[in-house]
Image (tube, coloured by chain):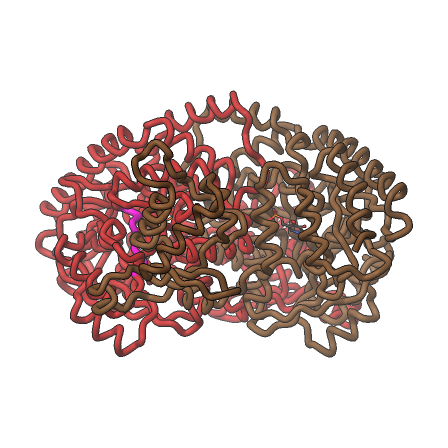
Chain colours: A red, B brown
Amino acid sequence: MPNTYKAGWKPDPRLPLPIYRQIEQYVQGRIRSGEWSIGMKLPPQRALAEAFGVNRSTVVTAMEVLMAEGWIEGRGRGGTRVIGIPDERVRRTMNLPDWNAYVEEGAHYPNLPMIQRINRLEFDRDIIRLGTGELSPELLPQEQIRELFASLAKRPVSLGYEQPQGDEELRRLLSRELSRQGIQASPSAILIVSGALQALQLISAGLLERQSAILLEKPSYLYSIHAFQSAGMKLVGLPVDEGGLRLSELERCWRTYRASMLYTIPTFHNPTGTVMSESRRQQLLTLCETIGLPVLEDGAYQELWLDREPPAPLKSRDEHGIVLHVGTMSKAVSPGLRIGWVVGPEPVIERLADIKMQTDYGSSSLSQQAAKMWFASGMHLPHLEHIGKRLRERRDAMLALLDAHWSDIADWSRPEGGFYVWVSLRSPIPVQRLFNQALKHGILLNPGVLYDRSAVRQLRLSYAYASLAELEHALKLLPQLIRSR
Amino acid sequence: MPNTYKAGWKPDPRLPLPIYRQIEQYVQGRIRSGEWSIGMKLPPQRALAEAFGVNRSTVVTAMEVLMAEGWIEGRGRGGTRVIGIPDERVRRTMNLPDWNAYVEEGAHYPNLPMIQRINRLEFDRDIIRLGTGELSPELLPQEQIRELFASLAKRPVSLGYEQPQGDEELRRLLSRELSRQGIQASPSAILIVSGALQALQLISAGLLERQSAILLEKPSYLYSIHAFQSAGMKLVGLPVDEGGLRLSELERCWRTYRASMLYTIPTFHNPTGTVMSESRRQQLLTLCETIGLPVLEDGAYQELWLDREPPAPLKSRDEHGIVLHVGTMSKAVSPGLRIGWVVGPEPVIERLADIKMQTDYGSSSLSQQAAKMWFASGMHLPHLEHIGKRLRERRDAMLALLDAHWSDIADWSRPEGGFYVWVSLRSPIPVQRLFNQALKHGILLNPGVLYDRSAVRQLRLSYAYASLAELEHALKLLPQLIRSR
Ligand SMILES: Cc1ncc(COP(=O)(O)O)c(C=O)c1O
Ligand SMILES: Cc1ncc(COP(=O)(O)O)c(C=O)c1O
């Protein structure tokens, strides 16, 4: 249960029934309908009081009656839980399924509680999102997308199921876009997916045996999602220096763990912002060609450079088809489109397309059409230039604020692109407490532990989302919270 | 490899290089880039000749040279396969990954070869799709969706990541829509998904242990996809009569297999068209409440009635929250939108939302906005009425054609809604041969074995997709093929 609760209902003071009785009946209704199922933990009384717009004591009264009548029970620190309908007949003849057991037994891992909270809190209107990996709404191409809608309104739209590999015209356009990045990909070697995350999911379901080991940078984006772990994969973290992941370790770990794949974010790494150097890229490929280790390259941030163009993607140097390259429209254009792609050998692409058909029958055709028009229109490059400028200002503002207010408590490096500054505090901090304290001040943080369990002193700050005023406010306030521990 | 091949390239007769040499170089290029990876089976020579627009003998010449040079090898009936780059250095120092092994070892089951072919052939322009479970393009609400685009162009669009459970306004609108079907669902008890298929996927990953047994009708839609089997579930088929699945068997199988869930399509079943009777629905719920068996109700076709309104969904009678209800816009409005929903107890919905976030970060926000406008606009009911009329004409035409041309060779029942007529041939037919023969005549069939391995004499015919002229042509021709075996 979230800490904030959206009831979509409020007691009505004009009714003849006392407020606490109205609440009682509301709760009974939820339990009767089964929406509040047996064993479910109720939202905290504070959250209920807030959602209903009443005093906490009114909620307490209602809860006491419900407890006395046998609808719910208090279990001390375990919170209040639903018992069910206190009706003799129901109790005697029925043996209702225990949904809580189902929720707990499902094979897929739940997100970390902290991530679940972040995922929800991000939609609180008043919160300052200091770690969000997403362009600020003001940087999204609102106007342009509306133009696209206007032209979509004028021509026949495709509303049916799409081809397994995705719209052919879109794949042709992507092939052209990718060649700008140095990647030669035939349309038949491209799969359209619903975002890069889905590509990772399909690869783990379609190409890897359970119990396979995946090598990856430590920290990494991949630790913050459970796609691979839930599919039974083991993640083996490799140490990183300022030139990217260390190759000596790569070979050693590949041997030790008999790894099946390397996952890497070589350009503007999430969360550290690191760029793998030219020479490291070349050596990495040579090594992987020698040991036969396929590379999964996540190019989510490739186009988001601020100072100078980064080295070309690994895929552009891949002469023997050992690299699967993943890209997305989420970071530079719009996450809501849910459009990404995978480039790889045709048998691999066909296999992934087949699994995609079993998973969701292809990506939204509206999104695919919007993507098509986006790339066909020539809007992409001017848009990249525009957001590049804005992100540069934002990064510089963040770095200046860090210089001014954080230099005695933390270290960080200067990202040349992407969204993130990886901040290391000089002394360890109780992350959960800092997270909660910041939240009390309306600031949402992404602690380093989400990306590496041992990164207890790190924070991932993002200059992409919050407004400049919010960045200033938050980056001035946080050091006070940190110091006053 | 598909039987048809799209190369996106053709030899150029104006070049000084002979055609067969151009083909050689093309193949070498694909192999050099790794898009045609080591071990990959080449498309059949016939398909290549067609794709390149040349004589088959030209392809044969090119292939012989490539074989002699060591790029590819022929393996008799195993087809021609890629060896790699015939370069000493490459062969000596490299140990390239074997993608074919990856493709074969991935944990997720591939689609049946026949389904893979159907998925691809459906996009051949000239084919008559006699089994497709999708509205004909002429029945899709083209005009209305274009109106939606025009209004989307006039207001701020949401382009960011969406909330875990999906857009709140859309969930409110769905709650209203569902109440028309008798289902009382709070917005907090609804999850937006990318089509009903994804809902099934999330439920199998999120609520069920590996090795769980799922009871379902036999035949069923679920046999034609591998979502559940790939997640390690066992499917246990239950016999069906004209009133729906048989309850005596349900209880017995639940006990024998210790089943975790019942999956059912009570209304206009896919593929049989059966409607579960009023009384069966009530008995089913009572039984499941007694034995504690959760029900997964697939309501994909609920609104597509032709003669009279069907009994209300199981969920509308579910007083204790034992039913998870799945719905979709695919069958009545547009599959390309990829918008569906799950209704269930809040803890279940939250669990599924969390997994969805890990799977694809939510559904396309364009699609969600289009769906919102669709339901807000009041277009839905008039559209349902319109397609109801058209589908009735189509069904009646199909039944008349069956009466006229099939009555001596087959039996079928008269569907009262949905898309399908389930035809049983009186004598067994070699399905694969009939499928191929029909294909030669440009007719794409969905054989019964896709929905039940033992349904070797059945075909799923759909009156939703092909035009009336196509239906007539195909339904006259097929009996000739069947008789002339
Ligand atoms: C490195 C990396 N890959 C993939 C993704 C997922 O992107 P998408 O929205 O395309 O699924 C993200 C988003 O945070 C990311 O940082
Ligand atoms: C019974 C049934 N459920 C679900 C689906 C999948 O629908 P969607 O397009 O919403 O994923 C289909 C489509 O064929 C179906 O027949």
Magenta residue check for A298: yes
Q: Position of residue A222 (x, y in %)?
A: 33, 60
Magenta residue check for A300: yes
**Could you tell whether B101 is left or right of B110 in the image?**
left
**A172 up-or-down from A301: above or below:** above
| Residue nearest the viewer, comparing B405 with B352 | B405
Q: Where is residue B335 in the image (x, y as percent from the top left)?
A: 60, 41
Q: Can residue A366 be seen in this view?
A: yes
**B236 up-or-down from B273: above or below:** below
Say which quadrant the C terminus of chain A sits in.
bottom left
**Could you tell whether A193 is left or right of A135 in the image?**
right
Q: Where is residue A236 in the image (x, y as percent from the top left)?
A: 29, 70
Residue in view at x 20 percent, y 51 percent? A273
**A448 up-or-down from B170: above or below:** below
Find the magenta span and give its range.
A295-301
Quarter of the rendering containing residue B386 = top right
Residue in view at x 72 percent, y 46 percent? B301
**Could you tell whether B91 is left or right of A103 in the image?**
left
Residue in view at x 51 percent, y 48 percent? B47
